[in-house]
Image (spheres, rainbow, N blue to C red):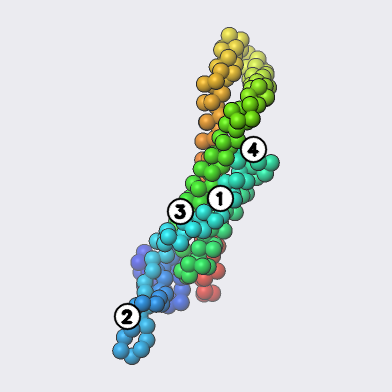
Amino acid sequence: MEITCQRCHQPIPEESCYCPSCGLPQLVYTAEEGTATPPNGTRMPVVRDASSVDWKVALKYAAIFGIPAGILCNGYSPLGLLGFFWMSAAGAWAVSVYVRRGHPAWVTTGAGARIGLVTGILAAWLAFAVSGGALYTQRYVLHHGAAVDAEWSHRVDMTQEMTAQLVSQMGSGDQSQLDAQKKWMLSPWGHAGIETFGFVFNGMFLLFFATIGGAISARLMARRRRPEI
């Protein structure tokens, strides 16, 4: 029986993972233990959708690579500036090992992106928790609140100075508004709000790169499975 593509209905070689005409990924046929054996002793192949994910296996690898990435990406890590690299690598490795150890022939780009996203969620949550825990420890456990406030005041002064220069160049400066803004930023609510916003923004940033890493890894591994045409 001739195999045809579900999208363009063109013939597809039996060993091909992609349609040679439109590039649509095809279903994977793998033999698994526990399947019924015909009378002649041959095993029937089991159809596995390459767009599906075995989350019981995928979550294990997402945690294995997401936890170290989250620790490296926290705001107090000297390597945190390379967060985009750690998260992309974590998503890519989670997909790569999932395919190699989970034994599917390949996964689609969408499935790889989902595995990368879950890896990023675990890593971003851990980075948020470590950063928040470190800040809490400094202020309330080690009683370094004065040093934390002094550092924050310095950051606010630098931000206000840059804002004042920009506003003066535009010719629409209002010193009273800048003073009110600075007062709010130095308040406990302002400090907490800005720090929280920064954590959330960084988390979204990390999620993006983890998802991209997983999608690229799935795409590259699928291309390796494509036979020469």
> Which residue is painted at 60% across and 46% down in the image?
71
- What residue type is disc 1 on? Ile
* Residue bearing mark 2: 36
Task: Tell me the residue that label 3 is attached to.
Answer: 114
Measuring from the top left, give residue 156's x and y in whole percent.
64, 21
Q: Are marks 3 and 1 in contact (CB under 8 Å)?
A: no
The Cα–Cα distance between marks 1 and 2, rounded to whole angstroms, is 40 Å
Marked residue nearer the N-terminal end (4 or 1):
1
- Which is closer to the viewer, label 1 or label 2? 1
Residue 76 circle label: 4
**Which of 122/22 is in front?**
122
72 lies above or below 215: above
3D distance between C-alphas at marks 4 and 2: 55 Å
Quadrant of the image occupied by residue 139: top right
Residue 141 coordinates in the image, percent (x, y): 60, 30
**Earlier-in-chain disc, 3 versus 1:** 1
Residue type for callout 4: Tyr
Eye-nearest disc, 3 or 1? 1
Q: Amino acid at mark 3?
A: Arg
Q: Which mark is residue 67?
A: 1
Helix, strand or loop for disc 3: helix
N-term mark: 4 or 2: 2
Helix, strand or loop for disc 2: loop
- From this viewpoint, which residue is outermost toward the top? 176
Q: Nearer the viewer, mark 4 or mark 3?
A: 4
Query: Between marks 4 and 1, how big is the CA–CA gap?
Result: 16 Å
State how far apart marks 4 and 3 are (Cα).
28 Å
Going 38% across and 66% down the picture, which residue do you hit? 49
Please name the amino acid that badge 2 sits on: Ala
Of residue 79 and residue 21, the one placed in the foreground of this image is: 79
